[in-house]
Amino acid sequence: MSESRVAEFGFFTKDRTACFRLTAPHTAMGAYSWWKEPSWMVDSKRRRMTPNWPWLLSALTLLQVNAVQAHSLKRGSAQDLKCTTKNMQVWDCTWTAPVGVSPGTVKEVCIKDRLNSCHRLESTNIKIAALSPGDHEVAINYLNGFQSKFTLNENDVSLIPDTPESLDLSADFSTSTLHLRWNDRGSAFPYPCNATWEIKVLQNPSMELVKLVSFNTTLSGRDIVHHWNWTSDLPLQCATHSVGIRWYIDYNRFSGYKVWSDWSPLKNVSWTPNSETNVFPQDKVILAGSDITFCCVSQTKVLSGQIGKTFCPLIHLYGENVAIHIRNISVSENSGTNVVFTTEDNVYGTVVFAGYPPDIPQKLNCETHDFKEIICSWNPGRPTGLVGPRNTDYTLSESISGKSVPFKRFETLTNESYRLAFQMLPGQEIHNFTLTGRNPLGHAESAVFINITERVAPHVPVSLRVKDISSTVVTLSWHLPGNFAKINLLCQVEICKASSEREVRNATIKGAEESSYLVAVDKLNPYTLYTFRVRCSTETFWKWSKWSNEKRHLTTEAIPSRGPDTWREWSSDGKNLIIYWKPLPINEANGKILSYNVSCSSNEETQSLSEILDPQHRAEIQLEKSDYIISVVAKNSAGSSPPSKIASMEIPNDDIIVEQAVGMGKRIFLSWHPDPNMTCDYVIKWCNSSRSEPCLMDWIKVPSNSTKTVIESDQFQPGVRYNFYLYGCTNQGYQLLRSIIGYIEELAPIVAPNFTVEDTSADSILVKWEDIPVEELRGFLRGYLFYFQKGERDTPKTRTFETGHSDIKLKNITDISQKTLRIADLQGKTSYHLVLRAYTHGGLGPEKSMFVVTKENSVGLIIAILIPVAVAVIVGVVTSILCYRKREWIKETFYPDIPNPENCKALQFQKSICEGSSALKTLEMNPCTPNNVEVLESRSIVPKIEDTEIISPVAERPGESSEADPENHVVVSYCPPIIEEEIANPAADEVGGTSQVVYIDVQSMYQPQAKPEEEQGIDPGVVAAYKPQMRLPINSAVEDFAAAEDEADKTAGYRPQANVNTWNLVSPDSPRSTDSNSEIVSFGSPCSINSRQFLIPPKDEDSPKSNGGGWSFTNFFQNKPND
Amino acid sequence: MSQREGSLDPQADSPVSFLPHLEAKIRQTHNLARLLTKYAEQLLEEYVQQQGDPFGLPGFSPPRLSLAGLSGPSPSHMGLPLSERLRQDAAALDALPGLLDAVRRRQAELNPSSPRLLRNLEDAARQARALGVAVETVLAALGSAARGPGPEPAATTALSTANNAAGIFSAKVLGLHVCGLYGEWVNRTEGDLSQLVPGDVA
């Protein structure tokens, strides 16, 4: 059943009316009912039906429908009966006359179950009063006898309210807002019932739907005018907007169909352009970050649109009107953001102000200073970005009193706290404040609920005055503006003494109205300068007031609380007693000390000195050195102090040991053992040790129970020796307990010890020095440092002692009583550099130096002379004896009468040397007895013979010679003088040259004639004379050769055999040593023939020049070149 | 300085020998006008700076708005006799203070936190008034009476009305126009007075 209805709703919903298409004549509605009624019956009896019943009922229903259709066709049929209602009170039914029946032939319509239910009419439309719920049989009778019957039910009636008529449509162009007003005509409907409204906004000229909104109202039986506002995104000036409205009614007692009414006729809103304004919206304030559309109404073409400096794409509306759309607009500057449209001939613009609504007022605080007005302050929070007329207006409202106070803005205010004064009402303590901030974008508020008696922050106290009561008590008075009659004040008095000590005292005072307040301040010190100031709060503390201005006040004087510290010293001659006293500290003087009275009394007499004016703290009295009691009294304007007494004589103490002490900084620490005999106190006095007696710089008193103290004085200076004396006080007087010398800080001595050399020997020096004066020592002497080293005056390395120098010898003398030092193990006749320095813990003092030469050692000199002489004599004697006894052997050996060639070992010497050498040929012995042998070479370069006496080929080193110059080697053949032999020299052949050996008679000295032609090829420079058995493998200049030849001629004879290469030395003593040719050999020293070693060592030019003043063995044996 | 046309009756077209005190007055007025020319430039700069973009951007030149009773110096101004030119200068300077005051009031709403602009506008109104009075004094001393003080110039009324009715953008443009007019008239006055200053004619 229900599904069937939905299908039918779908049909009439399309037409917005309830449409019925009757297929059964006369009783179409009835047929519907019939079809419907069994279903209801089925529904109600469904539980009792068996499963076979449904198909049976359906079959019966179909049969009945077919029967009715056949009956209707016989009688004629009415079609499309439609019933609607506008107000659920009158139904308006129309139908279509059956086919063949004129609509004007309707005779009457009768409703069966209603009295007088027949209505005469002549049309197919009838308005009837609403029928009660349920089915009603309606019969339509025609003049021609036809009759149509319907079953009419409220369910089939459609409720279509009248089209709503809007009373008014207006527009606020400044805000682009449409205002719609209409009447719901609720008096025509049962009530309460719900009405649903739908409003549409169309934008011309395209009639585009830009807004469709629906909402519900309730009809209350009265005509009510409704309002609807809508703000357009596009300024209303830029396009015509049309508005329509419709509705439908939902009444729960009406079971028929509810259908929307028709749309009301559209109402238009359009703007009449003027010449002044062309860009919209004008001067609008919008939320920063939102979107906005600007349009320009123009008769000419708009070329561009921009916001600020940014150009935007144009949106063409109609005609030449254009718009630009801005998204997420940023906060404007103070004068707003300019939006400009440029046409060909003009510039149009508007200004938009983008900002924020007011932030919630923060830190809203309300308090009173005087119970006359309440000051509320707050922080505005986030800046709105809006100024001038668009800035936030604040209003402070108090809900209990109902008063409000606006906030008057000063544009110079930025983001600091705002303040607003609210006048208090008498008797009102509880306040409920609400602060509201508004600007064109919104509002925000903050509230605070306070009891004003708990929010009191008094004004700063003024007119502070001080009045003396006594030397220790004053009164303070001040004025506090405000009405504090109902509360107690809590005030603080700050007492500041000498700008250092600060004391705060609290005072609770009963409040009063516009009153001055008074408090007494006691426990002050006499004659003391105080600074007072006051601040106040309330007992229910909220805030302190600011401190009042300071008031300085000097309390009055009182008598000094004690006598001054006193000490005394006898003058050096013991005739006068000097009395010292210290000025009283201000807290004990209790006033300005004007003078002192001093009296000395003994059993016999009393001497007084009165009215010693204050700056003087010393008095001298001529007394016999006996026992006196000295009394000192200080006086100020309030009176005299108790006397301070001290005995004139000290109790002797012989057991005094002088001790040492060193301080730190400006202080020195002293301690002592407790002495039960000291009943009064201890006194420590000190003075500069260099001053004469009586010496007193200062003194301090220490309680008798103390065993240590620290003495501090600005007078102390480092490096200055002070004497400290500890006295103990007994009933009989003071007794010296300890004597201490000390330094605040030790420094290095400023002078060096003055030392002298007491004695000097060949190996020792005795040094003696003196003490350094105390003033120059500047500390406790800890020792001396003594340095010495060899050195002479003005020698650079002896001028200063370098640390770590190995030659320096150091002696640390820690026995400060030692005043002499003997330096032993020194060298005789040597200069020594001596240095002496003193040191303290403060460092090393300056040095004092001296040069001392030790004495000469004469015994050593004598020994050094005698021993060599003795040795030389002994050697000479032994040699003479041996030579004498072996004279025959010597003659045979060295000087035979006829030399035996067989014994000529000189001719065999090379055999052993040259064996195995391919380069050298050994001279072979022939059975001849030559008188002279001369070896000639065919070399152009002949070695120069420097000294034939020492030339020996034995000493020649073959390896060196062959490597140095192999061409210089000569093949030597020993043969009789007349034999001429030419021997190929392999070495010479190799180099393309030949060597010729000529054996000649040393006596005839002629050249052989056998080979005269060959002789011509011989270099004239070749020496044709006897040469000893030696070779000088030295290339020399040809010019030198002649000289060598001459020399050889002169010394022709036996020559010692030696290789002069090994004597390759250049002695400056040699006359040839000046030759630049390094090949030239010189022989400057005698040497053994067979030894390569010189007897005299080569002269070392680099050796230091001998010291003429000294003596040594090396000097003694040295062979000086000039000698 | 270029030669300016026009004449001052009864003497014509050339610097004349005035009484010492009149010469001093003319020179003083001329110096004032020259000083205000610089001030007017500074005022215009400050004004443009405070209005936001595109004010001050190159290429932004809104059309001149017409103010009833006051317009910019016309090109034909140079062809008028000197006395007539000075009379026009005096009249414009008489109208300008009201306009500048109106601009200042509007700017006080738009730029309340720009005291320099507001002070410059206030100073400009006062200085324009002083210069106008000085020019009138010179005219009177020369025997050429200026227009007497009349009712509030129509320009001021029109501007006040426009300020209230028109949008803020129009007010900004109007203010720009007034500041420009102020500079132009002060400059023109300085030029006209220079022809009266002995030894200052090119």
Image (spheres, grey):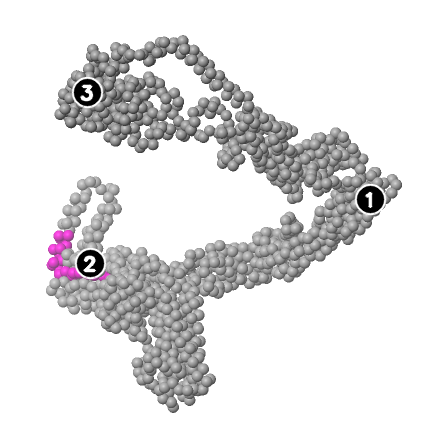
Subunit under mark 1: A
Q: Secondary structure at mark 2?
A: helix
Q: Is residue B36 magenta?
A: no
- Relative to A450, does residue A766 appear above or below in the rendering? above
Check disc 1 and report the residue beneath it: A622
Magenta segment boundaries in residue numbering: A65-91
| Whether residue A1029 can be seen here | yes
From the viewer's perspective, is A520 left or right of B112? Answer: right
Q: Nearer the viewer, mark 1 or mark 2?
A: 1
Subunit under mark 2: A
Residue most extreme to the right: A604
| Whether residue A191 can be seen here | no
Query: Residue at 50% of width from left, 25% of height from top?
Result: A1111
Question: Mark 3: few, some, or many residues within 10 Å (few <14, many ≥20)?
Answer: many
Residue most extreme to the bottom: B10
As drawn, the label of residue A998 is: 3
Gap between marks 1 and 3 measured at Cα:
135 Å
Q: Is residue A89 magenta?
A: yes
Residue A461 percent location from the top left of the image: 62, 58
- Relative to A272, does residue A234 appear above or below in the rendering? above
Subunit under mark 3: A
From the viewer's perspective, is A175 left or right of A908? Answer: right
Q: Secondary structure at mark 1?
A: strand
Which is nearer the N-term, disc 2 or disc 3?
2
- Relative to A1087, does residue A169 appear above or below in the rendering? below
From the viewer's perspective, is A463 left or right of A331? Answer: right
Residue A695 percent location from the top left of the image: 73, 41
Viewer-proximal residue among A193 and A500: A500
Q: Name the kind of residue labelled 1 in the image.
A: Gln
Check disc 2 and report the residue beneath it: A14
Q: Nearer the viewer, mark 1 or mark 3?
A: 3
From the viewer's perspective, is A166 left or right of A535? Answer: left
